[in-house]
């Protein structure tokens, strides 16, 4: 009896773990482009919002071994190893590497981040659905007027299935933006860009079913 329940508990755990996901690879770049992603140690979520530095580029990632050139004005797609099975919003942030550091050395600290893409909901009078539900990738346009140089590009998908306990699925890619201009977006810090009491994170998406939803974090900068 005891053994059996332990067995089923293990099965349940394995199933919930397999439903998780990692943004592990860009869809472009040739060669082994997954080498530009700081690969998370596992596919579990980052939990805890206020003051949590793991919100930058996940916890215990393996250092990326390459930095990829990406042209300003082009698009960049993060591919997931599994469907984005949890309901919730997604966003892509661009973090400018401070002078004196490189995309490989920067830890993501400081007010250096802007949001360049977001994915919220689609609603009709009878349905409420996150655009990314069961998707396998997220794409951002790199703003055409962005300043050239080294950046971290950060994919964020937030599972909202447990009300009040948001789960963050995050990866960072190391990129070097070529071309571009002299755009100056408003920048935020991670952590700090959202707080645990943000209605976008505390919302109960199951009941009563919301009729509107604002993706957390700053407004999108499109250059
Ligand atoms: C590609 O890069 C990933 C991440 O750095 C690494 O785990 C994998 O072994 C690499 N694959 C090949 C074929 O080099
Ligand atoms: C980044 O791109 C610039 C061209 O804009 C190039 O001169 C530079 O060598 C690149 N840096 C890296 C680290 O690839
Ligand atoms: Cu999960």
Image: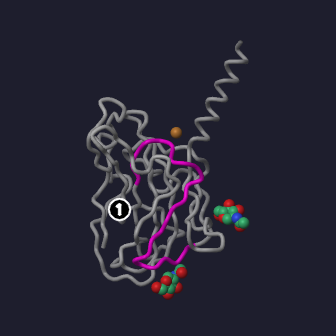
Q: Residue at x 66, y 23 (%)?
A: 8
Around disc 1, counting alpha carbons within 10 Å, would you say few (fewer than 14), some (14 to 19), or many (20 or more)?
A: many
The residue at which mark 1 appears reads as 115
Question: For the residue labelled by badge 1, is the local secondary structure a helix, a strand or a loop?
Answer: strand
Q: Residue at x 36, y 79 (%)?
A: 147
* Magenta segment includes 212: no
Q: Position of residue 156 (x, y in %)?
A: 44, 54
Q: Quadrant of the C terminus?
A: bottom left
Q: Residue at x 58, y 62 (%)?
A: 25
Q: Position of residue 124 (x, y in %)?
A: 29, 43
Residue 134 vertical placement versus 203 (above, below): below
Q: Residue at x 29, y 40 (%)?
A: 197
- Is residue 196 rendered to the left or right of residue 29? left
- Is residue 144 rendered to the left or right of residue 9? left
For the view shown, which residue lies furthest in the top direction? 1
**Count of numbered marks:** 1
**Does mark 1 have its CB less than 8 Å from ligand 2?**
no
Q: Position of residue 140 (x, y in %)?
A: 42, 65
In the image shown, does 97 or 92 lie closer to the viewer? 92
Q: Position of residue 125 (x, y in %)?
A: 27, 40
- Is residue 198 rendered to the left or right of residue 20? left
In the image shown, does 111 or 36 lie closer to the viewer? 36
Asked which quadrant contains residue 190, the reply is bottom left
* Magenta segment includes 77: yes
Q: Quadrant of the N terminus?
A: top right
Region of the chain picked out in magenta, as a range: 67-90
């Amino acid at each position: 009896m005891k053994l059996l329940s332990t067995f089923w508990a293990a099965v349940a755990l394995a199933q919930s773990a397999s439903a998780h996901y990692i943004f592990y690879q860009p869809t472009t770049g040739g060669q082994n482009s997954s080498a530009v992603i700081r690969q998370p140690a596992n596919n579990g979520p980052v939990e805890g919002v206020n003051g949590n530095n793991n919100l930058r580029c996940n916890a215990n990632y393996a250092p990326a071994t390459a930095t990829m050139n990406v042209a300003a004005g082009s698009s960049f797609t993060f591919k997931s190893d599994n469907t984005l099975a949890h309901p919730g919003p997604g966003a892509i942030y661009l973090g400018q590497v401070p002078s004196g550091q490189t995309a490989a050395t920067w830890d993501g600290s400081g007010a250096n981040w802007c949001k360049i893409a977001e994915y919220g909901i689609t609603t009709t009078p009878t349905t409420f659905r996150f655009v990314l539900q069961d998707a396998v990738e997220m794409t951002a346009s790199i703003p055409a007027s962005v300043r050239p140089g080294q950046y971290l590009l950060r994919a964020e998908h937030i599972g909202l299935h447990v009300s009040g306990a948001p789960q963050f699925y995050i990866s960072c890619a190391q990129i070097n933006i070529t071309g571009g201009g002299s755009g100056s977006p408003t920048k935020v810090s991670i952590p700090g860009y959202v707080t645990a009491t943000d209605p976008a994170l505390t919302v109960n998406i199951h009941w009563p079913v919301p009729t509107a939803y604002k993706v957390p974090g700053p407004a999108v900068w499109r250059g």
